[in-house]
Amino acid sequence: MSVNKFILKIFISENSPNGASDFIATFNEFIVNNSIKDSLIDVADYSHMHNGLGVLLTSHESNWSFDEQYGKKGLMVVDKGFSEKSFNDRFSSLLDEIIHICKTLEQTPRHKGLKFDFNTINFTVNDRSLTDSECEAAISEIKTIFETIVKNLYNCANISYQDNTDPAKRTGFDATIEGTLKD
């Protein structure tokens, strides 16, 4: 597969209280407590940018953010493609980790009332050097991989996809999962 860099995002539920500034302290605690399986580096506040990155937690292999891109708030992880692991291993690991982090955030007193919509997961190919045909072929393969991983994480009957190619020429999809997360 030609995809090396990708993005995963889990949106917050509608009417869920949120404050991007609360994530500055949370992400700094993640660094201190080594809460994410990567070498965490720094936190940057971009919450002043309309529909932007929000609060960004940088690391060597990925960037995490509570972002507001395209007017949809949620937790996003950007895999930079630096890992020696295969795409399947990185994809599976980051999907598992983003779900775990979202669940942790829901239980954090600082984020009281914050709820994530675990039934919709956004995936984006973050490599603008790929041709349209390469992206289309990769998306088809990624959906197969995604379904296998999701069936290990969810009690689900069906997964539907909505393509979401964005103006920046990145290809992706929103996956809607009918089911619940396994404990």
Image: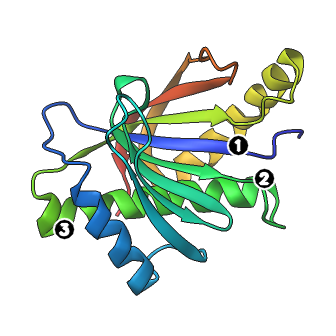
The amino acid at mark 2 is: Phe
Coloured how? rainbow
Image location of residue 177, percent across then percent down:
43, 33
User: Disc 1, disc 2: CB below 8 Å?
Assistant: yes
SS state under label 3: loop
Left or right, 1 with respect to 96, comes to right
> Which mark is drawn over residue 108?
3
Near mark 2 (Cα within 10 A), the count class, few <14, some 14-19 or many ≥20, is many
Distance from Cα at disc 2 to Cα at disc 3: 31 Å
Name the residue that disc number 1 marks. Answer: 145
Q: Which of marks 1 and 3 is nearer the N terminus?
A: 3
Q: In this view, does 42 lie above or below 96?
A: below
SS state under label 2: helix
Q: Earlier in the sequence, mark 1 or mark 2?
A: 2
Q: Is residue 66 above or below residue 170?
A: below
Res 37 seen here:
no
> Which mark is drawn over residue 87?
2
